[in-house]
Amino acid sequence: MKFSDLPHALAVFATALWVGGMWAIAYLAVPVLFQTLADRQLAGLLAGKMFSLMAFVGLGCALYLLAYQLQQYGKFVWQQIPFRIVLVMLLLLAAGQFLLQPMMADLKLQALPLEVTQSTLAAEFKTLHGVASVLYLAQSLLGLALIFGLKRGLHAE
């Protein structure tokens, strides 16, 4: 590999890390946590930590991918489908991590000493959790579109 290929290789790696990590955590690790651990509160705590860590990995990957695309296409970057996909994924990530997650954490604190799902705040928590799940699913599916875009040559070589 030539040094000039490094930015593209890093873009491919960032995409694989972000999208692969999202899928591995949400659709493999978290279900195993809830099936294996008897304490659902502990499973939820661990799942939340994994989602939060993955959000920050995604944030770094998204910023690199946007910068890479901007460097490749300049003022024409808005015409590039991968750029738009990454931007929407980043917005969904930010909404989930910096808007919905703090709201859900606050509800958990308000519910103490009960588990939030056993409290009077359960309906509100379930609604927020449902919205967060839909946003994450949309981000996951957009990630697949980004991966398939890589395969079809949508990223610059």
Image (tube, helix red, strand yellow):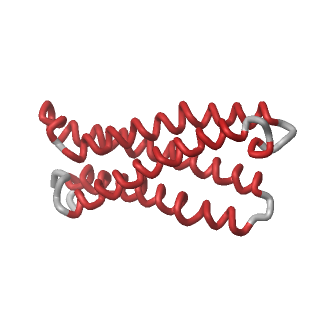
Q: Is residue 26 left or right of residue 19?
A: right
Q: Residue at x 34, y 42 (%)?
A: 64
Residue 2 in which image quadrant: bottom left
What is the x, y in percent for residue 69?
Answer: 23, 42
**Residue that sits furthest to the right in the current view:** 113
Q: Who is closer to the viewer here, 74 or 109?
A: 109
**Residue drawn at (29%, 39%), measured in percent from left and top?**
66
In the visual, does 148 lie left or right of 100? left
Looking at the picture, does residue 134 appear above or below residue 35? Answer: above
Residue 81 point in image, percent of width and height: 20, 45
- Please tell me which residue is depicted at 56% across the width and 35% down the height of the picture: 100
- Residue 125: percent from the left, percent from the top? 66, 39
* Quarter location, residue 119: top right
**How many marks do you count on the picture?**
0
Quadrant, the C terminus: bottom left
Q: Residue 47 or 7: which is nearer the viewer?
A: 47
Please state, as top left, top right, bottom left or bottom right, where the N terminus lies in the image: bottom left
Along the horizontal axis of the image, is 79 left or right of 53? left
Residue pictured at 73% horizontal, 35% vertical: 121
On the image, the x and y values in percent for residue 50 come to 60, 52
Q: Quadrant of residue 35?
A: bottom right
